[in-house]
Image (cartoon, grey):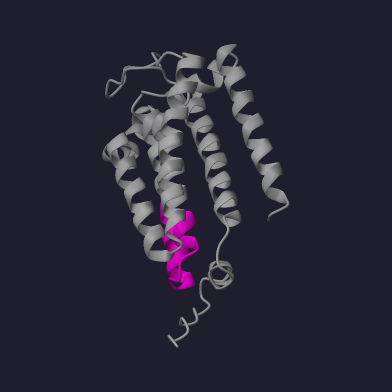
Amino acid sequence: MARATPAFLLGGILTVIGVALLVVTDAADPFDRALIEAVRGRDVSTMLAFLGPITDLGSTGAVIVVAFLAFAAGAAIGPWRHGLIGAVTIGLAALGVELVKATVARDRPSILEPIIVEHGFSFPSGHATLSMVAYGVLGVLLGRSRLPPAARTVLVFALGVLVVLVGASRVWLGVHFPTDVIAGWIAGGVVVLLYASFTRSVSREPAEAAADADPAAPRSDPPAAG
């Protein structure tokens, strides 16, 4: 996995750049229009109505809460600095999204009447990007925890489903193009991979590093004084 990580990172970055080029040249418009019209079709739209409240789980307030949870998880799981790095990563990702939005300057969709009104530029979706980063970082920390393997799998899977639903909600609500969401997912995934790789390389005490590599392994007690 360590050898594959740079390839995934490069591939993700190039994909986001490619999607951005499709957006600025309007080449993505037919794809976006077709998917938006499909999602907002009468029968499909009714089935997706549950996405309305879910979108708030990718809001700035929710992401801030997750950043604190990531810090707390790092402090509880150890080493605590992994949680701190995770919280900082989420904050930097939020700044990065705003910079890219201002650079691409894509207007919000006007294909159909939006269900809610959002202001600002559209590409990439901040909800999709930041939910991927926030819940992804939390997933990395939980995946490295000493919880039972089945519990770790269920929690990480649930976080992944949540990220997908948050992104889908933005298209259904009519406030983002599908390519905004896709680019946000990919960009967020790159950030999570960078976080996971960086925290693996952070220097640790030998015993702590061994426990991190195998979360189920018991930690040895510190030697008695004297």
Residue that extends furthest to the right in the rendered view of this protein: 3
Q: Is residue 89 magenta?
A: no
Residue 12 falls in image quadrant: top right
User: Which x, y percent locates residue 215?
Assistant: 51, 71
Residue beneath the point at 37% across and 53% down:
71
User: Which x, y percent locates residue 45?
Assistant: 34, 32
Above-or-below relation of 77 to 86: below
Above-or-below relation of 212 to 3: below
Compare residues 211 and 100 and report the one nearer the observer. Answer: 211
By secondary structure, the bulk of the magenta-drawn segment is best described as helix
Residue beneath the point at 42% across and 53% down:
83
Compare residues 196 and 226 and report the one nearer the observer. Answer: 226
Residue that extends furthest to the front in the rendered view of this protein: 226
Q: Is residue 143 magenta?
A: yes
Above-or-below relation of 196 to 44: below
Residue beneath the point at 60% across and 15% down:
27
- Decide if residue 49 is in sight here: no
User: Which x, y percent locates residue 100?
Assistant: 49, 22
Q: Which of the image's four quarters has the N terminus?
A: bottom right
Q: Which of the image's four quarters has the C terminus?
A: bottom left
User: Which x, y percent locates residue 157?
Assistant: 46, 56
- Decide if residue 214 is in sight here: yes
Residue interval drawn in magenta: 139-159
